[in-house]
Image (cartoon, grey):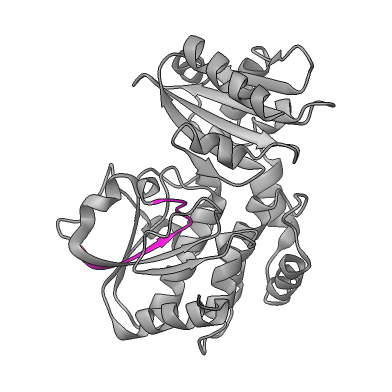
Amino acid sequence: MQTYEQELQQVKSFLLEHDDYLVVSHVQPDGDAVSSTLAVGWLLSCLGKKFTMINEGSIPKRMKMLWHAEDILNLSEQQPDREFSHVICVDCADFARVGYTKQLFADDASIVNIDHHPTNDGYGAVNLVVPEAAATAEILYDLLNLFEVNWDPEIATAIYTGLLTDTGGFRYSNTSPKVMRIASDLLSYGVNGPEIAETLLEEMTLPQTKILVEALNTLSLSEDGRIAWVYVTPEQMELCGAVSEDLEGIVNYPRNIQGVEVGILFKSLKSGIVKASLRSAGRVDVAALAQTFGGGGHVRAAGCSIEGSLQDIIPRVVEQVKLKL
């Protein structure tokens, strides 16, 4: 069993020994996925390496202010006509989370897997997986410090974004002393903390506000009041002019109701798939629960995608939650 320091050195060697990298994160990238992708890209640029950043899905509009965020390709719009032999996956809890970007991987591709999800299945030739880390960005902070690079406000802001979003604005239980020390360092490099918090955690678009109202109108609770859930349909999304990123944070509303142990957001897709986002107050391991449906995540925050209708999926998932209480 390698130590954390040995795993960091192994990734460092991989980055120094090769060139022409593909950097990917999970489908529908969130703050940690975007910031981690950019952190790796920034480091590779400092090393004079060639690299391509790509995702299945567009990055959230509110993160377009980050360093070279516009250079992260959206697979549905731009697809390189080639394969890559050296791939760096960040914030992907399992290989399936890279989505269709896997078609860009050469058959003999060497994969570096950098992640913090406890459900990570170690799919890389090199695995740097730290479940104790609050965010993948926390791990990348340590990695960047192995190199002789000069921190600037742009890269510091990217790392700060990953920490801020995955700790819920430094409010979740994963906000460790180390996270706060890193945040302090990043602020000293010129990060504008209040401005980032306002942009990422406070501001809401009009479609986001409208879909929140629609979702809250579907609020249901279990008989004992310990499970609460809401749902959104494609019709509601279209009516509100909302996109997937507008759903971010909605799951916290049922979870935040006094007495609720697990909050759930169900999103129905036109493809016949229902996506379930689960949040736990701490008593229920929603990552383990999500795994029973082919998903994964963290003890307190996880998700899964299930084929079927809302009418069928909601009672199935709620029943499984009841068994865990």
Q: Which residues are magenta?
A: 84-94
Q: Of 80 and 269, which appears nearest the observer?
A: 269
For the stretch drawn in magenta, the main secondary structure is strand
The answer, for residue 79, to whether it is visible in the render is no
* Image x and y of residue 186, in percent: 68, 72
What is the tally of numbered marks visible in this picture?
0
Query: Was residue 299 drawn as part of the magenta stretch in this picture?
Result: no
189 sits to left or right of 149: right
The answer, for residue 281, to whether it is visible in the render is yes
79 sits to left or right of 132: left
Tell me the quarter of the picture where residue 58 sits: top left
Q: Of 5 and 63, which appears nearest the observer?
A: 5
Q: Name which residue lies at 71% across and 22% down.
A: 227
Say if 218 sits above or below 96 in the image. Answer: above
Tell me the quarter of the picture where residue 112 sits: bottom left
Q: Residue furthest left?
A: 81
Q: Name which residue lies at 43% across and 80% down.
A: 10
Q: Quadrant of the C terminus?
A: top right
* Image x and y of residue 71, in percent: 37, 59
Q: Residue furthest right?
A: 258
